[in-house]
Amino acid sequence: MFSPDGKLLATPGEDETVRLWDPVTGRPVGAPLTGHTDWVRDVVFSPDGKLLASAADDETVRLWDPVTGRPVGAPLTGHTAGVWDVVFSPDGKLLASAADDNTVRLWDPVTGRPVGAPLTGHTAGVWDMEFSPDGKLLASAADDNTVRLWDPATGRPIGTPLTGHTAAVRAVAFRPPHGDLVATASEDRTARLWDPATGRPVGAPLTGHTAGMGAAVFSPDGKLLATASADNTVRLWDPVTGRPAGAPLTGHSDWVRDVAFSPDGKLLATASEDETVRLWDPVTGRPVGAPLTGHTAGVRTVVFSPDGKLLATASEDETVRLWDPAAKRPVDAPLTGHTDGVRAVVFSPDGTLASGGGGDKTARLWNPVTGQPIGEPLVEHTEWATAVAFSPPDGKLLATASIDKAARLWDPVTGRPVGAPLTGHTAGVRAVAFSPPDGRLLATASMDDTVRLWDPATGRPVGAPLTGHTADALAVAFSPPDGKLLATASMDNTVRLWDPVTGRQVGAPLTGHTAGVRAVAFSPPDGRLLATASMDNTVRLWDPVTGRPVGAPLTDHTEEEGAVAFSPDGKLLAIALDDGTVRLWDPATKRPVGAPLTGHTESVSSVAFSPDGKLLATAGLDDTVRLWDLSIFLNPIANLCQRVGGLSEEEWKTYAPGESLPRVCGD
């Protein structure tokens, strides 16, 4: 369930907890909400988003403050069996709960006290409830095959039960925008339409499903009704005529558990026991894109965010997944396609392309906004691709390096090679870099202990190889903004600085690491810092002018570092580790920023910031590239204020009486 402003996602669990998530980052917000002692069945936000209600098999309802994660008042007790459903009235002044004790109860969410006596009349457990759009009616659906209408102001039944179904009624819904029809869906394989003013059926039952139904929902404009069934299909109906609106939506291979319309009504999402979610065009009844896969057990629930930009699904695999319904892909899903580890990743200068080099001997191009591959893999290398780099300032060339002893140049628009391979190294090429600001030089580092410079326009070498390292050269980097220095890193535990114009070494080697140096990076925009990452589990910062270390090594790592990269403004340093994580550091304070970024299941071999610094791409030996939203790290206070807002005077007095309210968020 999304909060009304879409800034929080709440999920109930069989682990007796409720969890809150940031749907933008996919990360938990605070600790789990604990207190229930049995399976939490349902959660719902109040219309203003200031309260969260949860219902559980422990026979209670609980209220929570979603900002602090703290309980609001004592549990709401009175039910004598598990509570299955909970819903706020449209004005938020009432809370209704439905339970397996055959009753519905009304509560005042402000005081936590019951409003009137329990609503009795059902003779079996109550599964589902819904308030009418104006809040003047409450409908309840039960295992006794009936639906009852109630006046929530008095707690009295309105008319007689709605009878006709011959099995349990699993779902009930009022038609928007006025609530002039009630739809019910039953295990008897039918849906029915009712006039809530008279309690009489409208037309004949809606028949066609060949197994019981578990969900029924109207489109936002009320012009369509969708029903989901254990016959593996969803059906659309015209509620005015009671006739099917097109053919059944087929494709799922197991029970369809839930169905939801997007807020604009242009998409329909279905969740199934076949472990997939499907998107449909409700006008044509055709699928939109391929099924959304990733869950490893049945999908129980599907819900759109209030703005329709996110889709959340909950599964029996104990996970919640977020999807971008426009792109038809998971949010923050890995970019897959490589089949033997991804060794490198880089953004083009305009931030529109990322390329990963893999052990499958290919490089790939991706759209980082959609996560979709662009064109076919770049296939020419005969051994695994180790590095990739776009030429500045326009990204018109892509360079790749490989264990096949060659570097290659490509046109990233056409995906075709440019010229012949750059050959001369006598062992595998491990790194490649273009010189700023115009890409007139290309540097390659090799396991033959040398670095070579090339003219990418002609493909010819520039000068003699740069020699001096006594073991594999693993990394190269030009200094910004003018490329007047070239740094190289080696398995000989040293970093060397060179003048790329003369090919001569500048100063003595940078020593201090006690194992091979795997990565090197200059800080933007002026190259005043040089970062080096080593197999000795440390990262060191250096002054490239003096060749001296800047501060103590960054040592809060227990695994080898595989790559380093500065953000475009130089305020963040990303470090890739062999334990599958990425860590962010503030190079000014030498302190870690935030928690490690986790998700890769094997070593992270490369990291790259997008040109605007808003995204971080990471490449792993788990065959994936992952994209990370860095907004929370770039301006954490503003980001948090935007998501959850500041505390009101009333809230501050509740939690810090007698203290002055700090204006952290400027409100």
Image (cartoon, rainbow, N blue to C red):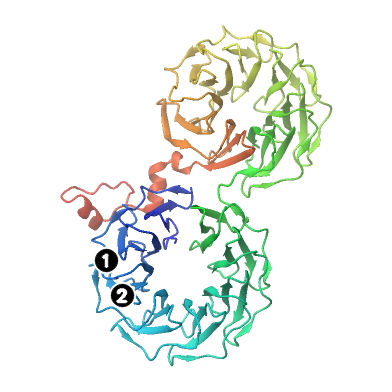
Q: Secondary structure at mark 1?
A: loop
Q: Is residue 456 above or below residue 154?
A: above
**Above or below, comparing residue 393 to residue 131 in the picture:** above
In the drawing, does residue 228 fall left or right of residue 77?
right
232 or 513, nearer to the observer:
232
Quarter holding the N terminus? Answer: bottom left
Percent from the top left, x then y, of residue 528? 51, 21
- Helix, strand or loop at mark 2: strand
Residue 403 position, x and y percent, is 73, 23
Question: Which residue is depicted at the point 53% across and 15% down?
Answer: 544
User: Label 2: how many residues lie within 10 Å, few (<14), some (14-19) or many (20+)?
Assistant: many
Residue indicated by mark 2? 105
Q: Quadrant of residue 653?
A: bottom left
Q: Residue at x 53, y 40 (%)?
A: 599
Whether residue 132 appears in this view of the structure is no
> Which of these two is toward me, 58 or 216?
58
Q: Amino acid at mark 2?
A: Arg
Q: Position of residue 469 (x, y in %)?
A: 64, 9
Residue at the disc numbered 1: 76
